[in-house]
Amino acid sequence: MSTLLIIFYFLSAITIATAFLTIISKNPIHSAIYLVICFFSVAGHYLLFNAQFLAIVHIIVYSGAIMVLFLFTIMLMNLNKEGEPHKKWATKLAAVISFGLICFVMLAVFIKAMPVIAAYKQTGQDFQSIKVLGKVLLNEYMVPFEFASVLLLVAMIGTVLLSKKEKSVQ
Amino acid sequence: MDSTFIIEKSVVIVSVFAITMIFAMYSTWAERKVAAFLQDRVGPNRAGWGGLLQPLADGLKLFSKEEFFPNTPNKFLFIIGPGIAMSTALMTSAVIPWGDKLHLFGKDILLQATDIDVALLYIFGVISVGVYGIMIGGWASNNKFSLMGAVRAASQMVSYEVAMGLSMIALLMMTGTLSLKEISAQQSGMNWNVFYQPVSFLIFLICAFAETNRTPFDLAECESELIGGYHTEYSSMKMGFYLFAEYANMFISSAILSILFFGGYNYPGMEWMVENAGVNTANVIGMLALFTKICGFIFFYMWVRWTIPRFRYDQLMHLGWRILIPLAIINIMVTGVCILAFK
């Protein structure tokens, strides 16, 4: 077995184990910490593909920003175990179906992208370098890229509106 | 991978590790000496000449103190907290170029553990992960004051990371690369980035103070309100790790400031030295120049600590979100206009 393969199995074991522990553990903080470890091992998988930019951005965004805020919230909320609300069967079913639909969309995206990836492979450029990535994003995928940023902006404005204190009625 | 490569890199990595540790150790000594100087005292002068053995005495003291465990159900997280803080403080040094290269044994040796394409992003990644050490330690202490300190530290670091990242974008628009090696090489002669991006430098400096939890931003361990902040419940070497991590962070952020804005290992007349005195001499002087700049910044950190009082918490958030972030965005726009106009 090559070294890369051993590293791959090791990382995969960590990823799957911590993902399960995230769901299983009773304490919400332990769950969040397992999720952080899971994110780190996913970043390790990106590094195995030699996608340095993706790995680092994954760590900055998910482990560094989102999970820190998440832990922060859980620590302040002081959740108790008994008060967990049980969702209805219909809600659970709806969640499963919508997740299945998202998987379907992802699969469609991957199948659609196959010929494009093959075309890029022929150009022989180093697609993990940020220079090439930036050019591709801002030339060929300009519109989706801008749409994604507009979506983020809308989400941000929405959060600010929601968290603003309501003016007291006089 | 041949064995010479592995040996070469191991030597570089071990020496970088040792240098970071020694700097962090002697920063504790320097901090006391600088404090004494600024307050017109003598400072430590019992252990060794001029108190030079004081860090060793401190280490011995911390190791031999009683290990106290608070009544917490999360003993593992309580122990791992300082470990995370320490290891993230040491990880950043992997991408810092300490010099250009040395010519030894018939081959060029790069004075850098690794030169990756996304070095600057790597540093941001490690900094953003660094907050976990404080948060996990503070939470696992099972103490309200520790938790408050941890939460303060986390919100402060997340807020100032935004301004730090935005101030970096203006610099990146000029350099066009994320590799610290190339950024250093671009500043040869006296083309230091601080002359082109003074606003960016100012924002980065303020954010570096906030990220290392140093005064005037040390609200995470604000004694008058929070006893000791996130390390209230810590004792012995676990406490030592938290304190040591702060000094290691200070050293690393000084190194990053010198490399990004003050020319890194470049000094005036380096080209001339390379031609006339050989590559090795020129680069050894370059390394000394870098360490001089780093020491200057460390002194600046201490100077500020013993001069400026601590902010109030709402003032801190106001400065981060309402002043530094808009300033950084305006700086990006001005830089963009300048690049368009002068190219």
Image (cartoon, rainbow, N blue to C red):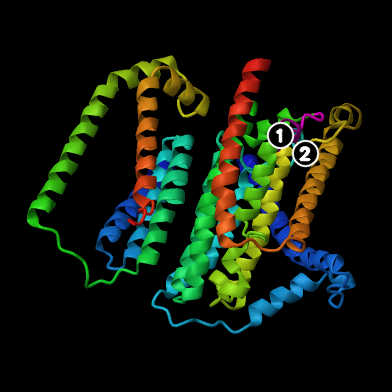
Residue A93 place in picture, x, y as percent:
10, 49
What residue sits 37% from the left and 31% below the top?
A: A150
In front here: B323 or B63?
Answer: B323
Which quadrant holds residue B221? Answer: bottom right
Q: As displayed, is residue A16 above or below residue B43?
A: above
Q: What residue is pinned by disc 1?
A: B184
Q: Decide if residue B51 is on the left or right side of residue A130.
A: right
Secondary structure at badge 2 equals loop
B113, B44: nearer the viewer: B44
Residue visible at 53% across and 67% down?
B149
Image-based side of A39 in relation to B91, left or right: left
Which quadrant does the N terminus of chain B fall into? top right
Q: Is residue B80 visible?
A: no
10 Å neighbourhood of mark 2: few (<14), some, or many (≥20)?
many
- The quarter of the picture where the C terminus of chain B appears is top right
Q: Residues within 10 Å of mark 1 (few under 14, many from 20)?
A: many
Amino acid type for the residue under numbered disc 2: Tyr
Q: Chain of mark 2?
A: B
Magenta range is B189-198
- Rendered view: B144 above or below B308: below
Mark 1, secondary structure of its residue: helix
Inspect the image, locate mark 1, and give the three-letter code of the amino acid beneath it. Ser
Evaluate if marks 1 and 2 touch, with contact meaning CB atoms under 8 Å apart: yes
The residue that label 2 is drawn on is B265
**Depicted A90 relative to depicted B240: above or below:** above
Magenta span includes A146:
no
- Which residue is situated farthest in the right direction here? B276
